[in-house]
Image: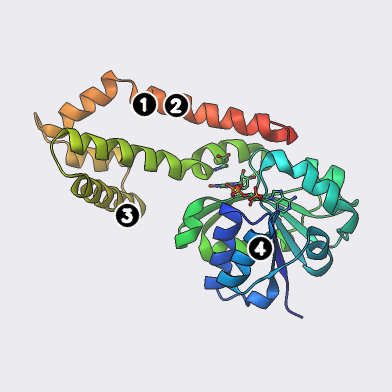
Amino acid sequence: MSQKVAVLGTGKIGEALLSGMIRAGWAPGDLLVTTRRAERAEELRTQYGVEPVSNAEAAKNADTLILTVKPQDMATLLDELAPHVPSDRLVISAAAGIPTSFFEARLAEGTPVVRVMPNTPVLVDEGMSVISAGSHATEAHLVRTEEIFKPVGKTLRVPESRQDAATALSGSGPAYFYYLVEAMTDAGILLGLPRSQAHDLIVQAAIGAAVMLRDSGEHPVTLREAVTSPAGTTISAIRELENHGVRAALLAALEAARDRSRELASGNG
Ligand SMILES: NC(=O)C1=CN([C@@H]2O[C@H](COP(=O)(O)OP(=O)(O)OC[C@H]3O[C@@H](n4cnc5c(N)ncnc54)[C@H](OP(=O)(O)O)[C@@H]3O)[C@@H](O)[C@H]2O)C=CC1
Ligand SMILES: O=C(O)[C@@H]1CCC=N1
């Protein structure tokens, strides 16, 4: 019997996962989606050929339920869902902050729950999905979770106590790079380049740097030193980054993201 997977609350990250599963070869007939709005359901049916169902039908018909609503909507979703989820379903939450114990307290005793923090590059099969088992999730449940998330990028198992930090680093991480590219593109404009050229130059620099970080085996400091010529241009820029406290800003920013993830733990954040 084929395994059915339902994505409940198919917004940005839910759709990114759905599209990745289809690219990875899942049959649309084995995928169910739930939405809050009828027009969103039709959009997903038209684009992916998947079946929109109610949350209760998803719980009844799918072996694995991936919950991708906002943390603040999770309690309401669970109130609706809990009476319909048999305890042999695997429940995967992609919500920031919310611990597996939140789900376990609301679902039938023994229901396996896995917490996952993916990121939007799952859309291009370069995602990072950080996975933690709840108290009833077994090795088989973790493997089943990895079967869903591995085709769309890398996966890493961590103890749940590290999930808030992982959320700050890789869940939110892509946004920091987009922010930097946006700021550096503005800098290109300041230097007199047309916006499209400034964008292309900085995006290609980012891609080249990312591939070297991944593939060279070198430490980032070594890679940066190779760019930084004595009395050259790069060190002049780095002096300004240090003067403006960019490193300290990043430490504070990621700490704030980690703290916000903790605040979301109750689902009311
Ligand atoms: N965006 C990201 O990069 C990442 C997000 N996450 C997590 O994923 C979750 C979703 O984030 P994101 O995709 O950005 O948010 P979205 O708002 O895009 O997606 C959530 C979706 O859930 C729908 N929804 C809410 N309540 C229900 C319900 N009861 N039944 C069915 N559908 C419902 C919403 O409907 P409506 O359109 O009507 O609001 C919306 O489409 C969050 O918990 C977030 O922490 C995790 C990793 C990365
Ligand atoms: O900003 C957020 O809360 C979500 C979780 C990680 C990325 N986006």
Q: From this viewpoint, is residue 9 visible?
A: yes
Disc nearer the start of the sequence (2/4) = 4
To which residue does mark 2 refer?
A: 251
Q: Is residue 138 left or right of residue 171?
A: right
To which residue does mark 3 refer?
A: 211
Disc nearer the start of the sequence (4/1) = 4
Dots 2, 1 in contact, CB < 8 A:
yes
Residue 82, given in percent of the width and then of the height, sits at 86, 52
Dots 2, 3 in contact, CB < 8 A:
no
Q: Is residue 185 left or right of residue 264?
A: left
Q: Residue furthest top?
A: 243
Q: Secondary structure at mark 1?
A: helix
Q: Secondary structure at mark 4?
A: helix
What whole-number distance in Å separates the C-alpha atoms at marks 4 and 3?
37 Å
Disc nearer the start of the sequence (4/3) = 4
Q: Which mark is residue 255?
A: none
Dots 2, 4 in contact, CB < 8 A:
no
What whole-number distance in Å separates the C-alpha atoms at marks 2 and 4?
40 Å
Disc nearer the start of the sequence (2/3) = 3
